[in-house]
Amino acid sequence: MTAALDELLDLARSTAVAAAELIAARRAEGVEVAALKSSPVDVVTVADRESETLIRGLLADARPGDGFLGEETGLGDASTTGVTWVVDPIDGTVNYLYGIPAYNVSIAAVEGGADPAEWTALAGAVVNPVLSEVYTATRGGGAFLGSRRLAVNADVDLGVALVGTGFGYTEERRRAQAAVIGRLLPRVRDIRRMGSAALDLCSVAAGRLDAYYEQGIHPWDHAAGALIATEAGAKVGGLGDDAPSERLALAAHPSLYAQLETALVESGFGY
């Protein structure tokens, strides 16, 4: 099984690196907005679509029987191998649009279908082309930034925790999230909003954040990052014993996870 996982990781890594090189080149040429999604501030660039096309082609060439779930093209053909690739061709598209160096390509291989509640993540890679950072993990094999093994911050009390989060794109959701932040902020060290769920999860794995929570993210936002954080020692989940979902994605060392979940409920987090 280890050899099989290593093969999946090699493919995830090499494909993510190739796509990261593509989006970096397109960023240097100038970003073109292709469409809007849920609101006028929720954008899709031409590079998002180019990146996903490249990723999908490389994965299909290497493993033609695998399934595919991508942010831009949705769910592809059902898997005949048991493996599905979950892909975000550019996570942090608004950062990408503005040239903020916090965007990435995220690719994960999962077993069990396209629903996070039912899948088991096998291998994942998150590549930030601006910082030349490559995060990787395999199930049971640990998490790495390059060759450095990662471990989450342990023994952190909520009152001194640096917590990452993100905001939705609709006016109603943002109002609710702002209300929660107003109640949570006095109870933690500080809040960070980087604009990329995958990088927030990797930052928990690397100890750059103590914890992360967000409402409204999709499977491709967290598939690879959640595995990386888990393999670095984080608990990653949703409400109660749920898997991460649009309702809630939460990641931290297990002791801090419990404190933050309680604080979010007490702060009026809208489940």
Image (tube, rainbow, N blue to C red):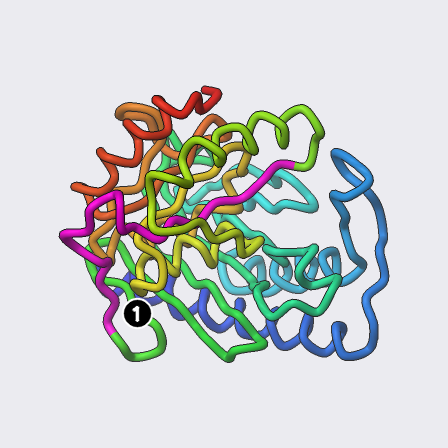
Query: Quarter of the image holding residue 60?
Result: bottom right
The quarter holding residue 202 reads bottom left
30 on left or right of 94: right
Is the residue 239 above or below the residue 102 in the image? above
Q: Nearer the viewer, residue 191 or 81?
A: 191
- Residue at image mark 1: 144
Residue 9 lies, in percent from the top left, at: 37, 65
For the N terminus, the quadrant is bottom left
Q: Residue at x 35, y 66 (%)?
A: 7
From which residue to which does the magenta span run?
149-168
How dense is the environment of label 1, judged by Cα within 10 Å: few (below 14), some, or many (20 and up)?
many
At horizontal 46% and vertical 41% (from top left) the residue drawn is 80
Q: Nearer the viewer, residue 101 or 129?
A: 101
- Left/right placement of residue 111 relative to residue 23 reads left
Q: Please name the amino acid that badge 1 sits on.
A: Phe
**Residue 12: percent from the left, percent from the top?**
45, 64
Residue sitting at the far left: 155
**Which residue in the rendered view is the most extreme toward the front?**
186
- SS of the residue under disc 1: strand
- Position of 202 with respect to 5 (left or right) is right
> Which quarter shows the C terminus?
top left
Q: Nearer the viewer, residue 263 or 54?
A: 263
Vertical relation: 119 (above or below) 16: above
Instruction: Kindly identify the residue that appears in the image at 71 percent across and 29 percent down.
Output: 171
Coordinates of residue 127 in the picture (x, y in percent): 50, 68
Front residue (pair 80, 13): 13
* Vertical comparison of 228 with 69: above or below: below
In percent of the image, x 36 and y 66: which residue is there?
136
Q: Position of residue 64 (x, y in %)?
A: 54, 54
109 is within the stretch colored magenta: no
Q: Looking at the magenta stretch, what is its main secondary structure?
A: loop
